[in-house]
Image (cartoon, rainbow, N blue to C red):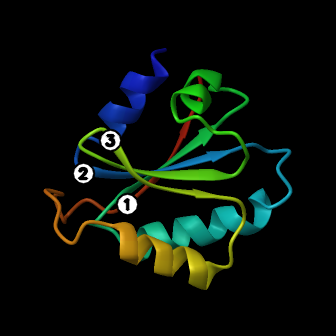
Amino acid sequence: MNVGRSVRARASCCETRFVDLWAPWCGPFPRVSPVLEKLAGELAGRMKLIKVNVDESPNLSRRFDAQAIPTRVLLKDGKVIARQVGAAPAAVLRSWLTEKLPSKTSCDHSVSAMAVHIYS
């Protein structure tokens, strides 16, 4: 499976993608993951949440130069527009996202944000 192509294909309905690079062994993962999924629902129509297990998709980890886990990357038109590393409280993540997300996208607003687990 071409994981990079899968990321693009599964998020193609929205220009802005929120890539969460995580690992099951990462201490903050159990606390951060539900927060990200909630935020994805709240910001449906502005972004797509794509969850990438770095152990199972090391090429994407390298592509986004993830030096620490968790790392979150916002992509617009295939380019990194923002990066956030480490665990953060829900309020900080919400503020970061709303500040960094472009105000307008070409998303189909009838499609809600979804978490996509991608495995190679």
Tag nearer the camera, 2 or 1: 2
> Disc 2 versus disc 1: distance between alpha carbons?
9 Å
Q: Residue 86 in the image: x percent, y percent?
A: 71, 60
Query: Mark 3: few, some, or many residues within 10 Å (few <14, many ≥20)?
Result: few
Q: Which mark is residue 14?
A: 2
Residue at 44% x, 71% y is 97
Left or right position of 66 against 9: right
Q: Secondary structure at mark 2?
A: loop
- Quarter-of-image position of residue 99: bottom left
Query: Residue 30, percent across and down?
Result: 78, 62
Question: Residue drawn at (23%, 49%), measured in percent from left and top?
Answer: 15
Quarter of the picture holding the C terminus: top right
**Among the 4 quarters of the image, the one containing residue 68:** top right
- The earlier-in-sequence mark between 2 and 1 is 2
Tell me the amino acid under the disc marked 3: Lys
Q: Earlier in the sequence, mark 3 or mark 1?
A: 3
Relative side of 102 to 65, left or right:
left
Return the mark for residue 113. Answer: 1
Amino acid type assigned to the residue bearing label 1 in the image: Ala
Nearer-N-terminus badge (2/3):
2
Which SS class for mark 1?
loop
**Do the residues bearing badges 2 and 1 touch, measured as CB atoms within 8 Å?**
yes
| Dot 3: element | strand
Residue 117: give x, y in percent of width and height.
56, 41
The amino acid beneath tag 2 is Cys
Residue 94, percent across and down?
Answer: 50, 78
Q: What residue is disc 3 on?
A: 79
Up the image or down, 61 lies above or below 59; here it is below
Front of the two marks 3 and 1: 3
